[in-house]
Image (cartoon, rainbow, N blue to C red):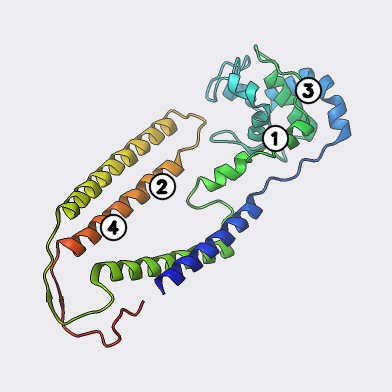
Amino acid sequence: MPWVAIVSAAIMWILLLFLFNKETAPKPVVVDPAVVANIGKEWPTVGKSVFASAGCVGCHGAQGQGVVGPKLAGDEKILKDPVYVHTIIVKGKGGMPAFEGKLKDNEIYAVANYVLNSWGNKIDPLLTPAAVAAGQSKVDPAVLKNRSRFVPEDLKLPEIFLATFIMVLLTYGVIGLYSVWAEGMELHPGIHKVRSTPLAVLGMVVTLALTVLFSVLFVHQMVVDYAGWGAREAVMPNVTAEGFYAAMIVLTLALAIGLYKKFFMDGEVLVEDASGEFPW
């Protein structure tokens, strides 16, 4: 039964991933011929006007030198991935708001190309809807943003149900496997003495050392993320790393407790298990 529960949880986990992929899939890019035709004409004038009127100047500076927001002038990162600029303008990031619905399509491409071709920046060819559509063949930044959180913003009832049921099945299966490993398939009345082995002692020491290591890494990651937030940097906290370290702390502690019960803790059974095995 423990293996049945774990396999069922794995199947449901796959279904949950498909559900999340469907919810976070990027919207298809609509290529408007009129927008494409005017990109080269509009970005020097419309782009500059939008950069000033939309509030970009207040965060990034009139010359892209950076104020509250990051520096844009001479930024190699955005020149290597121009689609990233379009994504950030549309979706927002950190303290920067999303301009989807606030700006027209031609204004978004105009201001994106203005940033990509000003203050020492230069791309050739210009950013177009076709380039954005081609860039979506990669993993969309919005998808990564949702997957990096413990609780995505668009979490709905089906995801909550599946995630909860998966955790119940995994807990049930792991407890069953642990019980068989720690206490055997049958329960016999009496006091059961255990004797630790050098290998068990080594395992306990290594497990506790890993717990301390992951605790230090977790605290360090929290300090780094908090410092970045305090400095108002336009970066998302590394929630994935925080979650990984926290999970490893719990797992290594659970492993240490299991080793202690198996190799260091005497046990006593008062009544024999009539069925010969646990109810798992």
Dot in front, 1 or 3: 1
Q: Residue at x 68, y 21 (%)?
A: 115
Q: CA distance from mark 1 to mark 3?
A: 24 Å
Q: Locate residue 10 relative to residue 203 in the image: left or right.
A: right
Q: Is residue 155 above or below residue 139?
A: below
Q: Earlier in the sequence, mark 3 or mark 4?
A: 3
Residue at 19 percent of width and 49 percent of height: 202
The CA distance from mark 4 to mark 2 is 17 Å
CB atoms of marks 2 and 1 within 8 Å: no
Mark 2–mark 1 Cα distance, whole angstroms, equals 29 Å
Identify the disc placed on residue 120.
Answer: none
Q: Is residue 121 shown above or below 216?
A: above
Asked if the residue under mark 2 is in contact with the one under mark 3, i.e. CB atoms within 8 Å, the reply is: no
Q: Residue at 78% of width from left, 23% of height from top?
A: 46
Where residue 98 appears, as percent x and y from the top left, is 64, 38
Residue pointed to by mark 1: 135
Q: Left or right of 194: which side holds 123?
A: right
Q: Earlier in the sequence, mark 3 or mark 2?
A: 3
Distance from label 1 to label 4 (Cα)?
43 Å
Q: Which residue is mark 2?
A: 243
Give the residue at x 80% y 31%: 106
Residue beneath label 4, please?
254
Identified by mark 3, the residue type is Val
